[in-house]
Image: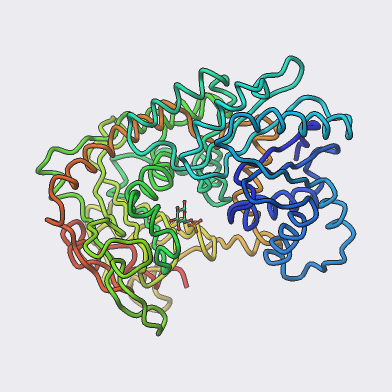
Amino acid sequence: MEKADAQMLLIFGASGDLTTRKLIPALYELYVRNLLPENFVILGAARTVLTDNEFRRKQCDGILTSQKELSAKDARLSLFLKRVYYMGFDTQNTDEYETLKNRVEELQNLYSLPDSIVFYMATPPEMYEVIPLGLQKCGLAYTSDGFRRIVVEKPFGTDIKSAKHLTRLLESIFDEHDIYRIDHYLGKETVQNILVLRFSNGIFEPLWNRNYIDHVEIVSSETLGIGNRGGYYESSGALRDMVQNHLLQLMAFIAMEPPVAFDPESIRDEIAKVFKSLHHYTPEEMQEQIVRGQYTAGTIAGESVQGYRDEKNVSGDSVRETYVAMKIELDNWRWAGTPFYIYTGKRLSEKKTEIIIHFKSTPQQLFVGQCSGSSCNQLIIRVQPNESIALRFGLKIPGSGFEVRQVSMDFLYSSLSDKKLPDAYERLLLDVMLGDSTLYSRADAQEASWDFIDPIIKNWVKRGKDGLAFYASGSDPEEVDRLMPHNKRCNRCNDIIK
Ligand code: BG6
């Protein structure tokens, strides 16, 4: 793989969980794989006062936690950490940006680095405007002989208005192609493989349309609750947290037209077209085709867990959804009449993300035991865990007669390599350092997805608790049967992938 040119990565909000749990371990892994630039510096900045060494120790713990087999004495670990620096910095205080600029220049001089910087906003979203403006004011947002790129974590806005506003603000400082809206689902190996599966094999494309596909299911279920994120989740909910970004992106990879070339803009053009073809619900369709739920107390893996309303920083009468199931239609030639079903929720019985393509069945059943309906021929893409792809079809049982049984042809990622799959952040960080935005989302796609989501949110606000289904932790809301009968839903087909 390609190696990026010398540069600095400046992480805002660096004392937070995302930096320690995800970003620094991913950067260390890239370093070990010899994919970080020969010459680099990582500068963390956040309000907490820490020395460089205190910050390094914290990041070292994060790396060791993510890589259990790694020894704290590993020479590469200390070499990597030597390039990691920290600066206590109040993002809200515009005067401090001058000090930040001085620190950046000092490190650039110390290591003879070119003036190329990736800014990573791992901060709460309230800072997404403040930081670029501060960088603009002190001049750090500009360079004459290097590059500036800025990574924005999700949520990118909370509705179309705020998303557009944020884009306008960022574009007044950075070029659109230097704005990287991150969606960590696109960094997952299995998700990238959807593109390869579809566009490097001749066998799927002829079948990949409304004529042969009955429906598609996309599931992302979690066993965890909202943890300590009550404050965030109360203003977000499952629709904004998972559907607007991760799940619609997965859907776009399945639904997009073949790009004219494998370059960022060609791919992002096709993704934006999918979002623009999302069928907007009428008020009646909203009631019929969307289910929203909230978990109550229950049992997960034998342990009792509390209900959403009892979680920290959650209102006792909250109507925030922790579960969403929806039937989505695309108004375009390829997919007219072929629905996409999306399910996502917290505190469900299993942690998994899976896409199931259900092909139409044969027009006639010739054999005894032959499966009928849209569950007979399925292509199942298991995004996580046990990453795999399986194709399900009917075969004759050995012996006399023509009795048919469903079988599954499986490909397990673990059989390709015994190495663990790279974390999503490794790929995405490497890409931004290389200047490749293929797996980052573009403003028009973001806006089209908010355009689809906004009316749903407004409708829910209007309806309050009317239509909110409660489900005991560890189970699905029963109301989801309204969208798809119980025995047909993919999460009832666990026998397929063991
Ligand atoms: C995050 C959401 O973006 O994705 C979380 O904010 C969710 O609520 C997480 O738990 C799921 O990610 P993954 O990679 O564990 O499926």
| Residue 310, horizontal then vertical, whole percent | 31, 70
Up-down relation of residue 306 to residue 153 (above or below):
below
Q: Residue at x 66, y 25 (%)?
A: 148
Residue 4 placement, left or right of 201: right
Residue 238 in view here: yes
| Front position in the image: 189 or 86 | 86
Left or right of 427 in this view: 300: left
**Residue at the far left in the pictured view:** 284
Residue 391 left/right relative to 493: right
Residue 256: image x %, image y %?
Answer: 41, 35
Looking at the picture, tell me which residue is in the foreground, 148 or 244.
148
Q: Position of residue 314 (x, y in %)?
A: 32, 61
Give the camera-side residue of 107 and 329.
107
Q: Is residue 328 above or below residue 291?
A: above
Report the residue at 33% width, 54% height from top. 234
Residue 438, located in which quarter of the rendered image? Answer: top right
